[in-house]
């Protein structure tokens, strides 16, 4: 059995209220510690609480479906890099970027360079290359093929839309077909929900129909997304039956907000080609925000 944990929309901490000069005079490690303490204060350890629980259940892999930062400043990106390195080995954690990770022009290049070890496909170059598009990438882990797509583009203020274009669609179909022929359980990761009506117009993904065609012609067993900060299950048409499309609450959401509290999905993949068995357990923060508890179990 292969166990995959799924979190999303980490939005690691708010921007510190310090001038650039003050920050530049500090070593990054000191900054990260300070930053984490601030997070504890503001989000009473929500993300730490979730991560500890995930660690306890010993998943084989962790998928993070985007929005790791807020404004994609260099300091936030460095803080996330340090947080990721502390979370585990890059070969065991796979990331796709969200709209916040490409918040301003130039940010996308910075985040994809900094987090490349977590977005490097099995056949990708060993180091980040400026003109080598990272996406889609494929990583094979046990019986599972993790396929990472990107919808991240810099958008005008107050817009949070994403884009899934034809080049990426063609490459994704090829990866899905190859993984299917190899008898792997195919999991596609994408930040924006590839479902019409799942989010408002200014937050939607451009290319929803293209993504649906990609899944139906390439084949997939599961699609994971973030962006909405909601715990949802939608379905897309696949050529061997409906494909579940699963979203999850923000990993940093404390109680009392308008969105559901922080949660993570723990998927168990069992069986083999033609007879896959997929179970999803959703663990959510308790009302007092001190622990995490099983909220729902779904057998797909
Ligand atoms: Fe988000
Ligand atoms: Fe988002």
Image: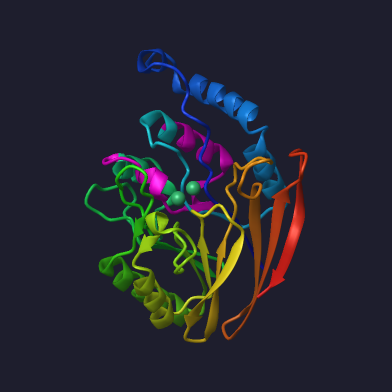
Q: Residue sitting at 64 percent across and 50 percent down? A: 260
Percent across and percent down for residue 219 are 45, 79
Location of residue 164 (image quadrant): bottom left
Residue at screen point 78% across, 39% down:
288
Q: Is residue 172 magenta?
A: no
- Indicate whether residue 91 is drawn in magenta: yes
Q: Is residue 123 left or right of residue 221?
A: left
The magenta segment? 78-106
Left or right: where 116 falls relative to 144: left
Is 29 above or below relative to 254?
Answer: above
Q: Is residue 23 left or right of residue 251?
A: left
The colour scheme of the drawn protein is rainbow
Question: Left or right of 70: which side holds 40?
Answer: right
Q: Position of residue 241 (x, y in %)?
A: 54, 85
Which residue sits at x=58%, y=25%?
38
Can you give x and y, in whole percent of width and height, for residue 19 in the image?
Answer: 39, 16
Question: Residue at the location (59% across, 46% down)?
Answer: 251
Q: Nearer the viewer, residue 138 or 16?
A: 16
């Amino acid at each position: 059995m292969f166990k995959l944990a799924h979190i999303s929309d980490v939005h690691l901490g708010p921007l510190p209220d310090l001038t650039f000069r003050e920050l530049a005079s500090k070593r990054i490690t000191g900054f990260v510690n300070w930053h984490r303490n601030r997070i504890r204060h503001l989000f009473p350890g929500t993300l730490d609480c979730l991560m500890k629980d995930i660690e306890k259940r010993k998943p084989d892999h962790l998928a993070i479906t985007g929005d790791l930062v807020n404004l994609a400043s260099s300091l936030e990106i460095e803080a996330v890099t340090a947080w990721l390195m502390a979370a585990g080995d890059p070969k065991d954690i796979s990331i796709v970027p969200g709209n916040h990770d490409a918040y301003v022009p130039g940010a996308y290049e910075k985040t994809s360079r900094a987090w490349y070890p977590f977005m490097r496909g099995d056949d990708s170059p060993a180091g980040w290359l400026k003109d080598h598009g990272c996406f889609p990438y494929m990583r094979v882990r046990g019986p599972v093929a993790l396929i990472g797509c990107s919808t991240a583009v810099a958008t005008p203020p107050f817009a949070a839309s994403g884009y899934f274009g034809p080049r990426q669609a063609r490459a994704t179909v090829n990866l899905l077909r190859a993984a299917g022929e190899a008898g792997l359980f195919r999991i596609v990761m994408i930040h924006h929900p590839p479902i019409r009506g799942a989010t408002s117009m200014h937050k939607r993904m451009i290319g929803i129909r293209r993504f649906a065609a990609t899944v139906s012609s390439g084949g997939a067993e599961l699609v994971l997304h973030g962006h909405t900060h909601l715990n949802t299950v939608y379905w897309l048409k696949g050529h061997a039956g409906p494909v579940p499309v699963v979203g999850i609450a923000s990993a940093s959401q404390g109680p009392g907000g308008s969105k559901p509290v922080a949660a993570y999905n723990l998927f168990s993949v069992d069986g083999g080609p033609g007879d896959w068995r997929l179970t999803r357990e959703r663990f959510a923060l308790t009302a007092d925000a001190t622990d995490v508890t099983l909220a729902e179990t779904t057998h797909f």
